[in-house]
Amino acid sequence: MSRLLQRVASSIFKQTQQLGQQTRLVSTQQSSAPKGLQQFFENGASLPEQTWTGRSWKASELRLKSFDDLHKLWYVLLKERNVLATQREEARRLGIDKSTWTNAGRVRKCKKSMARIKFVLNERQKAYEEAARLSNGSV
C-alpha cells in the first residue's frame, strides 16, 4: 500500500511540473508603461469611465501555470489592486458617493484571484511535502 501511495504522489508531482512547463506566459515584451506614480492611474485619468472586465481566475486554470507565471500574475494583480485603491481614494477625496464608484467588482475579482493563487501554491507545497515524506519511507 505504501508503494502505491508513493507512486501516486510521485505521479501527481511530475504531472504538476510537466503542466507548469507546458504553459508559459506568451507576452514577454517590455511595454512603454508609465513610470512612477502615473502607473497607479488608469489611462492617465484618476477616475476613468466604467470599463468591462473579465472574470477572476479559476483555480483549475491556475493549476496549469508554472510557478514563475503565478509569481508574475500575483504582481500584476497586486498592481491592479493598487490602481483600484488609488481610484477609490481619489473618489473619496472628490466626495464621490461609494455607491457610484464602479470598480468594487474589479477589487473582488483581484482579491479572489490572489486567494486562489495562494490556494494552488499551498496545494503544490502539500503535494511536494507528501511526496518527500513518502520517498523517505516514513509512512
Image (cartoon, helix red, strand yellow):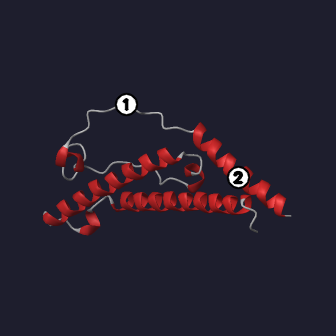
* x and y, in percent, of residue 3 in the image: 83, 59
Left or right: residue 98 versus residue 22 is left
Crowd tier of the residue under label 2, counting other residues whose Cα lies within 10 Å: few below 14, some 14–19, many 20 or above: some
Residue 32 position (above or below residue 133): above
The CA distance from mark 2 to mark 1 is 33 Å
Q: Dot 1: what SS?
A: loop
Q: Is residue 9 depicted above or below 16 in this figure?
A: below
The three-letter amino acid code for the residue at tag 1 is Gln
Which residue lies most toward the right here?
A: 1
Query: Which sits earlier in the primary sequence, circle 2 or circle 1?
Result: 2
Residue that mark 2 sits on: 12
- The front one of 123 and 116 is 123
Q: Quadrant of residue 120?
A: bottom right
Label placed on residue 59: none
**Residue occupying the point 65% across, 59% down:** 127
Give the residue drawn at x 44%, y 49%.
71
The quarter of the rendered structure image containing the N terminus is bottom right
Looking at the rendered structure, the secondary structure element under dot 2 is helix
Q: Residue at x 33, y 32 (%)?
A: 30
Q: Residue at x 47, y 54 (%)?
A: 56
Q: Is residue 3 left or right of residue 67?
A: right
On-image quarter of the C terminus: bottom right
Dividing the picture into quadrants, the one containing residue 105 is bottom left
Q: Nearer the viewer, mark 2 or mark 1?
A: 2
Q: Amino acid at mark 2?
A: Ile
Q: State the mark number for residue 29.
A: 1
2 and 1 marks in contact (CB < 8 Å): no
The answer to which image quadrant residue 83 occupies is bottom left
